Image (tube, grey):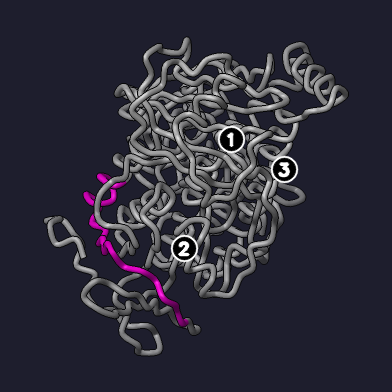
């Protein structure tokens, strides 16, 4: 346990409904970016969270991820962290894939129209600081040995330098990476295959600075990437078709230099390597992200090639999707069945990332003359066909991700909510920092009437009494524009429900139904009605993917 944190939450014993002692609400296994974001979200929602980590208690400066995409930055903005991260990184308006193929991130309709180049440990630093301030209990040097679960909770067994231990929680989440002990404990397979063998990683200094903080290229013979950490150190990832060796084969700086010369035309005078290793890249995904009261997220659930820099980003978005649902269930605002939508929404995203990153790496490493021609044509398509390139950058950045909303739903339901300006001058993602649903309503009602100045009140014309959402679950704001649509935004920044109805009575009825269904509380009384979130009801009012 991290006893040095003065704000560590007292996760004192609770009882399951069956009477068993519970040490905390949620156990998170793995203190990488995915686990840290998830744990911080849950703790900020007022829940007891214990995070188990096999490594000693310090942020590692040895990391593979370098790219933070726009959708991830939006999620960090909703937690008040994005601006600090951006200030220490290198924003790039375009991302080179191979040859002359670029993705133009500057076209994204986002507050962050770029790819941020920054090392993973900087992301971890901010997320760990937030988690500690929220009261997460950290237990380092805790190696998970197994777990047991029943209808009321899950018990995780682990080993520390002091001996064996166990903790019981309502739910457990494995964010413990490719070799996940949690995944093994629940018996889930990890089907897939190796895509690239004998990749080399190195952290080095350079005598000559590259033109860009993120330099990448692939030829028929080799692939290389050089990314700046911003402190004089550079991460190098490379592959040589003519030198394929096992993960345990020796690797030295001369081999790294040779690869970069083949792929980039220069080794930039690299020297003073502080770390060099060899690894392979797999494409794998578990069939289920949930087994009873245990969930998997990040690399524990899916792993793929480094092409496009999507790995860490996908894991962070897994965490953002799962955290608000766990919080809603544990606070009595939703039934356990809401958690099934984590699989429905995120498993297809993981599968799509496997396919897109795999396609990118296969195209980049084409060797034959017809293959090289196909690669050139692909680059020209990206350059000349704006709809194709636009779709590609929206996919890689995460901006284009949408969740299924079911038949009869509003066209906005399931889609990402953009960071719109609001009537009081604030932004939507600033309001999302409160961790609640956000209800966006017209700033002026039909006939020129304005909504009540009372927080949470909406007064449709001729509708007596108005509607007051439960304030502990929903924040009400108003459009800055004259837009008439009423939109309910989920805590993870996706549209839960919307209506274009302007008839006061019709809109009020639809809104009341949506608030009961999504937040579990009858407008005006704040009482729990979690049964209202069960899958029955009109399709347009169901949670996405239900």
Tell me if 66 is positioned left or right of 453 in this view.
right
Residue 116, image quadrant: top left
Q: Position of residue 335 (x, y in %)?
A: 52, 69
| SS class, disc 2 | strand
Mark 1: few, some, or many residues within 10 Å (few <14, many ≥20)? many
Does the magenta-highlighted stretch encompass residue 138? yes
Tell me if 490 is positioned left or right of 160 in this view.
right
| SS class, disc 1 | loop
Magenta range is 128-148
Residue at x-position 52% and y-position 15%: 266
Query: Which residue, as the protein is rendered here, is positioned at the far right?
Result: 370
Looking at the rendered structure, which numbered label has been put on residue 73?
none
Residue at x-position 60% and y-position 67%: 534
Looking at the rendered structure, which numbered label has been put on residue 174?
2
Mark 2: few, some, or many residues within 10 Å (few <14, many ≥20)? many
Residue at x-position 54% and y-position 46%: 279
Residue under numbered circle 1: 398
Q: Where is residue 458 in the image (x, y as percent from the top left)?
A: 45, 40
Earlier residue among tags 2 and 3: 2
Front of the two marks 1 and 3:
3
Does the magenta-highlighted stretch encompass residue 93? no
Q: Classify the position of the C terminus by image quarter.
A: bottom right
Q: Where is residue 445 in the image (x, y as percent from the top left)?
A: 52, 29
Q: Are marks 1 and 3 in contact (CB under 8 Å)?
A: no
Viewer-side residue, 194 vs 499? 194
Tell me if 185 is positioned left or right of 546 in this view.
left
């Amino acid at each position: 346990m991290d006893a040095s944190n003065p704000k560590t939450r007292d996760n004192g014993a609770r009882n399951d409904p069956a009477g068993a002692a519970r040490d905390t609400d949620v156990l998170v296994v793995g203190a990488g970016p995915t686990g840290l974001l998830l744990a911080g979200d849950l703790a900020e929602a007022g829940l007891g969270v214990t995070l188990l980590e096999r490594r000693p208690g310090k942020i590692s400066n040895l990391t593979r991820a370098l790219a933070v995409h726009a959708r991830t930055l939006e999620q960090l903005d909703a937690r008040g962290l994005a601006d600090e991260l951006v200030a220490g990184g290198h924003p790039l308006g375009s991302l080179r894939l191979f040859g002359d193929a670029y993705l133009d991130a500057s076209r994204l309709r986002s507050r962050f129209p770029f790819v941020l180049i920054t090392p993973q440990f900087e992301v971890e630093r901010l997320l760990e600081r937030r988690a500690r301030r929220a009261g997460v209990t950290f237990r380092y040097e805790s190696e998970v040995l197994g777990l047991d679960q029943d209808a009321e909770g899950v018990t995780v067994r682990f080993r520390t330098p002091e001996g064996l231990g166990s903790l019981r929680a309502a739910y457990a989440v494995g964010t413990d990476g490719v070799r996940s002990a949690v995944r093994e404990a629940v018996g889930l397979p990890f089907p897939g295959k190796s895509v690239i063998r004998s990749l080399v990683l190195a952290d080095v200094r350079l005598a000559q600075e590259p033109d860009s903080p993120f330099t990448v290229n692939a030829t028929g013979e080799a692939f290389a990437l050089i990314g700046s950490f911003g402190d004089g150190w550079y991460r190098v990832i490379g592959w040589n078709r003519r030198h394929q060796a096992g993960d345990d084969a020796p690797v030295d700086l001369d081999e790294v230099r040779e690869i970069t010369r083949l792929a980039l035309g220069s080794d930039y005078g690299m020297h003073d390597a502080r770390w060099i290793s060899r690894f392979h890249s797999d494409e794998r995904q578990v069939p289920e992200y949930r087994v009873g009261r245990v969930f998997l997220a990040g690399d524990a659930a899916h792993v793929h090639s480094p092409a496009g820099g999507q790995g860490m980003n996908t894991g962070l978005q897994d965490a953002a999707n799962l955290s608000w649902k766990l919080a809603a269930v544990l606070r009595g605002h939703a039934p356990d069945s809401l958690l099934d939508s984590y699989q429905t929404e995120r498993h297809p995203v993981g599968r799509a990332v496997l396919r897109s990153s795999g396609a990118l790496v296969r195209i980049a490493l084409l060797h034959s003359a017809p293959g090289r021609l196909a690669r050139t044509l692909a680059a020209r398509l990206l350059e000349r066909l704006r709809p194709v390139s636009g779709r590609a950058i929206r996919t890689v950045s995460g901006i284009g991700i949408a969740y299924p909303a079911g038949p009869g739903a509003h066209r906005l339901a399931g889609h990402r909510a953009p960071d719109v300006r609001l009537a009081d001058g604030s932004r939507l993602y600033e309001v999302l920092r409160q961790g609640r649903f956000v209800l966006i309503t017209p700033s002026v009602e039909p006939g020129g009437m304005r909504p009540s100045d009372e927080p949470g009140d909406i007064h449709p014309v001729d509708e007596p009494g108005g509607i007051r959402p439960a304030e502990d679950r929903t924040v009400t704001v108003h459009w800055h524009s004259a837009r008439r649509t009423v939109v309910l935004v989920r805590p993870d920044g996706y549209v839960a429900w919307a209506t274009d109805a302007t008839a006061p009575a019709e809109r009020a009825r639809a809104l009341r139904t949506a608030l009961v269904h999504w937040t579990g509380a009858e407008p005006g009384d704040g009482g729990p009605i979690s049964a209202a979130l069960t899958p029955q009801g009109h399709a347009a009012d169901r949670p996405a993917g239900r």
